[in-house]
Amino acid sequence: MTYIPAPDRYGKMEYRRCGRSGVLLPAISIGLWHNFGNITPFGVQQSILRTAFDNGICHFDLANNYGPPYGEAEHNFGIHMDRDWRPHRDELFISSKAGYDMWDGPYGDHGSRKYLISSLDQSLKRMHLDYVDVFYHHRPDPDTPLAETMGALDRIVRSGKALYAGISNYPADKAKIAIDTLRKLGTPCLIEQPNYSMLDRWIENGLTDVLREEGVGCIVFAPLQNGLLTGKYLGGIPADSRAGHDPRYLKPAAITEGKLKKIAALKQIADARGQSLAQMSLAWVLRDKVVTSALIGASRPEQVIENIGAVHSAPFTAEELAAIDAALAL
Ligand code: NDP
């Protein structure tokens, strides 16, 4: 059936300016890393994306190697594009990336101009798109000169195959050099994509200062720490959870007693605030406006609906923030 988006979708979301650019992003964005490969029924994927858009999530995040297998999430997204999204292309902000291993041989990994440009060409074909809104270098490459990688991003933007350039997983010092290099080339860096959650606060150690000073946006991935920060593992590992059915990225051994103790204490704080732990975890990463968007994953549409509830959360009091710090120190 033809998809007709909810007419009130934009009223349900908060939109934040991405650094000092002209781009606004939804406070919550959706990523297609998990649940969009060949092991998830197409109808489930479709209802996750439709539910997201119906609730004002107009940013979909992909990468060349999302699957399984690699490339499959982009391939499936191409079919979603044809079935649902073509009439809404200009309402969507779509990203892709290259930087991790993608194909065999010396040109399918890391940060060369050869890899980035050919990978984006492949991604556009898979996704049935003429351009992406932002194209990222997915991770820093210690062996390729940064000038070459940033030069490739600049070239890509000038070619019209991406509207903006981004970097992902760059630590503060490398992010600063990448941002300076892109600015000198005339293609400002729109956005950095690091991981950030209550359980992993590394970006507070310098990276957020760089982004604030440079006016670069920040979209944080895995804000729920692969689902741990929803509280779903407090009673054991559910069979239909990431750790239960796809433990490559959330190994049961990583769900330690120490982490569960902190998560149980965090859940009490969320309960007292009258929201779920997932909602509090998202509100927490969004508490500082340097974070433009929290980039979630979802295995079913109900999770998207719950997570959207974070957008209109009450601001944290100083006491709540102190209680969260104390829970994390347990
Ligand atoms: P999250 O930390 O948001 O984890 C998402 C998973 O948590 C879901 O798939 C689901 O898993 C579970 N979940 C989500 N909401 C709920 C809920 N309300 N209740 C219960 N369980 C819930 O993020 P991801 O790790 O999925 O990463 C998000 C996106 O970030 C990716 O899709 C990708 O776009 C991007 N990313 C970028 C990286 C980079 O290097 N730049 C690296 C990793 C991710 P389940 O139901 O299966 O347990």
Image (cartoon, grey):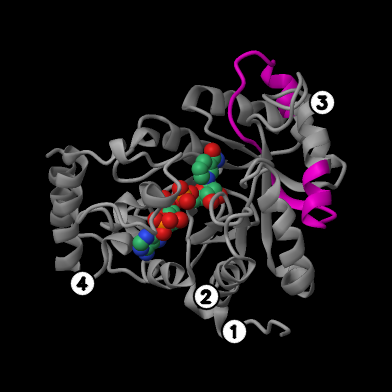
Residue 76 position in % (x across, y down):
71, 58
In magenta, the rendered stretch is 122-150
Cα–Cα gap, marks 1 and 3: 42 Å
- Please name the residue shown 16% across and 56% down the image: 320
Residue 120 position in % (x across, y down):
78, 41
Tell me the SS state at disc 4: loop
Residue 274's disc is 4
Tell me the SS state at disc 3: helix
Mark 1 Cα shell of 10 Å, populated few (<14), some (14-19), many (≥20): few
Cα–Cα gap, marks 2 and 3: 39 Å
Question: What amino acid is labelled 1 in the image?
Answer: Ala
Q: Name the foreground residue: 110 vs 40.
A: 40
Mark 2 Cα shell of 10 Å, populated few (<14), some (14-19), many (≥20): many
Question: What amino acid is labelled 4 in the image?
Answer: Gly
Cα–Cα gap, marks 1 and 2: 8 Å
Question: Circle 1 is placed at which residue position?
Answer: 6
Q: In this view, does 75 lie above or below 329?
A: below
Cα–Cα gap, marks 4 and 1: 27 Å
Cα–Cα gap, marks 2 and 4: 21 Å
Assess whether residue 126 is covered by the magenta stretch.
yes
Residue 62 position in % (x across, y down):
64, 50
Q: In this view, does 197 lie above or below 81?
A: above
